């Protein structure tokens, strides 16, 4: 450990660490809670579940989201499922197996106490959601059904057809709206949070822009919780919603919150390939399809025959061949790299040879069309609508695309950032996925944070610290307001003639090339120069029409892209500093003879947490990772 904040990791054995921690956390009387105001930014699974639970506990909660309804948060897009270790499983699953899979899946770059807690809480999440009425898929006898996801040999993923995120979000939304009706939650939609307010070093509020009126607002509270999702849109083309952004966490970073492992970004192997250069969004085909779909390419490079004309013996089921134990269910980082390698070697199919087949033929033959339709119907319909190809008649074509960000704001075991009073939940924080997130683990983490962890730890922090009321005209609030006004004024000078999107697209192209599926030192250094230059051009050539008042979508985009430039540089720096390959961070210079990631535990078994400095290079702090219950081993899925 260097001079980083104390991660507050529990002492003693990790198996019962969370229970012991909970029992030792100070409490607050229900009466006092009613006088305390909390701010929650984001109404995805992490934010909605936290806000509902904290309000249920008695706090006054104000919730901000840029969406017009909490139900539109990006969590709604999650398709495949949510992991949980439930004793009912018949394949010998257990908390310890989920713990091991998560830690190993993240290539031993996560905290073991955090992974253990996640595995433990996973089962309670399912109970909570079932009690809310979330319609999980069920077996004939009524028990909850499960399926498999990558990186695990057991079937522990609970799902609601291909709409798991939507159904879970409806559960959290109901819980949230109940509190709105009870008057304990004040819900403010269409608010874009653009700045964090610190008073005497403690987070006490935010500045946001009302996206309809354009007015800047100050909101203060005794503590602030950020749950604003991931930053994959730094790549421009990603599976995330168009407006997913980094603004709230980046601004918190500029105010002193450390940013952990920014270069740990996940490229998902099964997305619908990009159709043309003007496309602005990519669509995910859930990993759950790999339960029944087989991934293959022609064994001959340059083969232009349609899939149907390629005989069985000439098909290369490359994941099954290279990873006989896990086959098509290898983790995402591994599957993405292998697909890209073969496409680069001329085996790829579709326009530009940038895709591989995901084929349901054998599953349809063995299980029948009805079964496959019932399992994945909405996903297959979506594929057909987008591509015009019928997945029941011809194999789907898929290619890796930016999808999830394991990096995020550094938080301690209590989910508090390095700014006291600022808690970070869900994809916006960096825990607990290490260098690679396993499929179906994000929903689990977001809901563990929101329903179970933050409600306990926020209370404990409030119990032990002063909780002053901050007036909205406090000098710290006015300063934060001025910072936002100034940024908006500068962007609205409308100095140039290029659209915001054109810059974002170019930034994305640099990032996917330099800091995508694989990285190398030279490319990362060049990337830093390219992003720096592009950022300069952005400020001198961008056109942001319209004014600060009223709705102005171009201004919204400009503010977001401005933050993406700064984040992109930090990602490149982080990737450059991490001289090893681990999980999704694949440095070309560090690989085994058979092209697998080569970790360097001696020098890099740590979390990199970056400190922002105004007009100076950021500082890289490290938090060492100690493993007491599992010795880091070579991550092999063969
Ligand atoms: C297509 C797709 C499929 C997925 N499928 C799965 C799956 O099957 N299983 C799984 O475990 N994971 C899946 N994931 C990942 C998972 O869905 C996300 O990691 C998770 O839902 C993120 O939840 P969250 O609450 O952290 O953030 P989000 O759901 O992204 O919510 C962010 C919230 O913050 C608000 N917000 C953001 N910025 C601001 C701002 N500046 N000001 C105000 N409000 C702001 C938004 O309005 C929103 O309410 C999938 C992801 C994608 C993209």
Image (cartoon, rainbow, N blue to C red):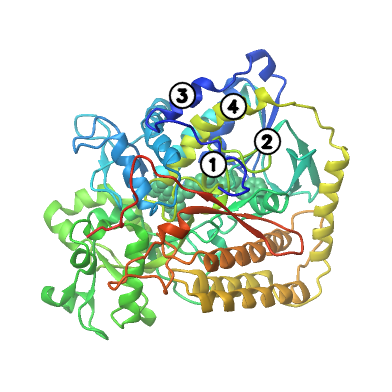
Name the spot of residue 396 as percent of width and height, x first: 30, 66
Using a 10 Å C-alpha cutoff, classify the residue at mark 3 as few (fewer than 14 neighbours), some (14 to 19) or many (20 or more).
some
Find disc 3 in the rendering and name its residue.
20
Name the spot of residue 283 as percent of width and height, x first: 43, 61
Give the foreground label among 4 and 1: 4
* First in residue order: circle 3 vs circle 4: 3
Rendering quarter of residue 602: bottom left
* Local secondary structure at mark 3: helix
Relative side of 619 to 141, left or right = right
CA–CA distance in space, label 2 to label 3: 23 Å
Q: Quadrant of the C terminus?
A: bottom left
* First in residue order: circle 4 vs circle 1: 4
- Residue at screen point 47% across, 64% down: 282
* First in residue order: circle 2 vs circle 1: 1
Find disc 1 in the rendering and name its residue.
71
CA–CA distance in space, label 1 to label 3: 35 Å
Q: Is mark 1 within 8 Å of ligand 1?
A: no
Tags 1 and 3 touching, CB below 8 Å: no
* First in residue order: circle 4 vs circle 2: 4
Q: Is residue 403 above or below residue 77?
A: below
- Residue at screen point 42% across, 42% down: 112
* Local secondary structure at mark 1: helix
Give the foreground label among 3 and 4: 3
CA–CA distance in space, label 3 to label 4: 21 Å
């Amino acid at each position: 450990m260097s001079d980083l904040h104390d991660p507050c990791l529990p002492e003693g054995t990790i198996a019962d660490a969370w229970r012991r921690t909970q029992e030792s956390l100070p409490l607050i009387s229900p009466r006092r809670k009613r006088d305390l105001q909390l701010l929650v930014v984001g109404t995805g699974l992490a934010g909605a579940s936290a806000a509902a639970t904290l309000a249920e506990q008695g706090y006054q909660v104000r919730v901000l989201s840029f969406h017009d309804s909490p139900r539109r948060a990006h969590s709604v897009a999650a398709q495949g499922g949510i992991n949980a270790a439930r004793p009912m499983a018949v394949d010998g699953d257990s908390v310890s197996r989920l713990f091991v899979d998560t830690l190993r899946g993240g290539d031993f770059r996560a905290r073991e106490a955090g992974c253990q807690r996640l595995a433990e809480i996973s089962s309670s999440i399912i109970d909570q959601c079932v009690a809310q009425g979330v319609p999980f898929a069920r077996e004939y006898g009524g028990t909850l059904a499960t399926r498999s996801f990558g990186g695990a040999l057991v079937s522990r993923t609970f799902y609601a057809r291909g709409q798991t995120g939507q159904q879970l979000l409806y559960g959290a939304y109901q819980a949230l709206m109940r509190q709105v009706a009870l008057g304990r939650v004040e819900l403010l939609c269409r608010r874009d949070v653009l700045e964090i307010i610190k008073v005497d070093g403690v987070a006490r509020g935010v500045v946001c822009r009302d996206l309809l009126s354009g007015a800047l607002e100050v909101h203060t509270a005794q503590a602030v919780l950020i749950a604003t999702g991931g930053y994959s849109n730094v790549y421009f083309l990603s599976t995330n919603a168009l407006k997913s952004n980094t603004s709230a966490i980046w601004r918190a970073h500029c105010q002193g919150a450390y940013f952990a492992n920014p270069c740990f970004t996940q490229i998902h192997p099964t997305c619908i390939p990009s159709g043309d250069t003007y496309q602005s969004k990519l669509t995910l085909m859930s990993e759950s399809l790999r339960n029944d779909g087989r991934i293959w390419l022609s064994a001959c490079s340059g083969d232009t025959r349609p899939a149907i004309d390629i005989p069985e013996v000439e098909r290369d089921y490359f994941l099954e061949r290279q990873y006989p134990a896990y086959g098509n269910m290898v983790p995402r980082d591994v599957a993405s790299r292998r697909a890209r390698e073969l496409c680069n070697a001329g085996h790829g199919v579709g326009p530009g040879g940038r895709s591989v087949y995901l084929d349901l033929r054998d599953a349809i033959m063995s299980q029948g069309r009805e079964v496959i339709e019932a399992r994945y119907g909405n996903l297959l319909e979506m594929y057909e609508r987008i591509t015009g190809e019928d997945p029941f008649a011809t194999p789907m074509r898929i290619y890796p695309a930016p999808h999830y960000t394991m990096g995020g704001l550094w938080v301690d075991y209590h989910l508090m950032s390095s700014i006291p009073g600022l808690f970070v939940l869900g994809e916006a924080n960096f825990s607990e996925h290490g260098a690679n997130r396993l499929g179906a683990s994000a929903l689990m983490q977001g809901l563990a944070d929101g329903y179970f962890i933050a409600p306990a730890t926020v209370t404990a922090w409030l119990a032990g610290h002063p909780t002053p009321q901050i007036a909205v005209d406090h000098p710290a609030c006015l300063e934060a307001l001025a910072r936002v006004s100034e940024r908006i004024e500068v962007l609205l000078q409308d100095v140039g003639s290029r659209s915001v999107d054109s810059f974002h697209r170019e930034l994305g192209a640099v990032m996917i090339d330099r800091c995508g599926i694989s990285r190398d030192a030279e490319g990362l250094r060049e990337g830093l120069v390219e992003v720096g230059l592009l950022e300069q051009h952005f400020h001198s050539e961008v056109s942001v029409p319209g004014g600060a008042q009223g709705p102005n979508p171009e201004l919204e985009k400009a503010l977001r892209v401005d933050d993406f430039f700064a984040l992109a540089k930090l990602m490149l720096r982080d990737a450059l500093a991490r001289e090893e390959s681990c999980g999704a961070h694949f440095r070309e210079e560090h690989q085994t003879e058979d092209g697998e990631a080569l970790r360097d535990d001696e020098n890099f078994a740590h979390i990199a947490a970056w400190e922002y400095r105004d007009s100076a290079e950021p500082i890289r702090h490290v938090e060492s990772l100690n493993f007491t219950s599992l010795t880091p081993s070579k991550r092999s899925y063969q």
